[in-house]
Amino acid sequence: MSSTPCIDLFKGSPATALLPTQRLSDAAVSALSKPEVTVTGLDYGPDEGHLPLRTHLAEWLTGYYKPSQPIQADRICITGGASQNLSSILQVFTDPSQTRYIWMPQASYHLGFRIFEDAGFYRKLRAVPEDEEGMDVEFLERALASDEAVAERGEGYKRPERYRKIFKHVIYCVPNFSNPTGATMSLRRREALVRLARKFNALVICDDVYDFLHWSAAHSPDNGNSWGPILPRVLDLDRTLDGGPRDIFGNVVSNNTFSKIVAPGCRVGWAEGEPQLVYGLSQV
């Protein structure tokens, strides 16, 4: 039998040599040796998460994405990772008796199905085809319009509660390097998706977990870390497109995690969106 080591491609696990063990150890020792960090960092903190962490994260994201408006800490809350936060988003902003469908690419992240079903959306998952521009937003618009016609006839939909923000639909997507197809949504489709979400009161949940894992065509030989975003995020488009969000919640939330850029076992992430939406998430 050959002793040649195998590379297991079943999971997206990095090579063990890439795990930043020493750097994490050094960072922990440094942080825990500073009373100004430990006193607030290890105590009960704000619901949205440790403010210095959110502030640094906002600055880092602003430097990377370069949106037209700087990202502020009140647009971010710390989560238990992308999968946990997906469940939290559904818990806060959907209700299976009022939210009509979950729309997602035909080929989607397999664990997402279980999360949606656990949230009460069994038999309410709907597939959207993808092409070279990513999710087929034109197909999605026709499907949403058809559903709206059914709703106008009063066929089986409960009226939304007056005092809680519940979205009629959820649109789940991975705009960059969609798992498992690898497709990247075009700018035209991203803009159309924002307008569509506003029109039909849908929440677009963007799993932006792969945004930092690409090699740019504009590589700088002087700084191998000088990558930037491939295209504007759907979230950033919602902030500015056609005058910005239609209400205080917006229609897009960015779901992200450190597990893709630090280590898979680092089950810490963040959500970014309009401050009112982020506050709602922080109350879970």
Image: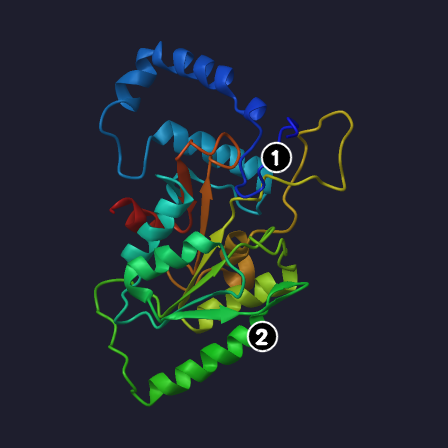
- Where is residue 175? Give x, y as percent: 57, 55
Which residue is depicted at the point 34% across and 53% down? 89
Quadrant assignment for the N terminus: top right
* Mark 2–mark 1 CB contact (< 8 Å): no
Is any atom of residue 270 visible in this view? yes
217 in relation to 36, above or below: below
Residue under the image location 46 percent in, 13 percent down: 26
Q: Marks 2/1: CA distance?
A: 40 Å
> What type is the residue that disc 2 sits on?
Glu
Residue at far top of view: 33
Left or right: 223 with respect to 159?
right
Is disc 2 placed on a helix, strand or loop?
A: helix
Callout 1, which amino acid? Ile
Of residue 185 and residue 236, the one placed in the foreground of this image is 185
Which of the marked residues, 2 or 1, is nearer the chain's N terminus? 1
Q: Which residue position is annotated with label 2?
A: 138
From the viewer's perspective, tell me whether residue 30 is left or right of residue 59: left
The quadrant holding residue 37 is top left
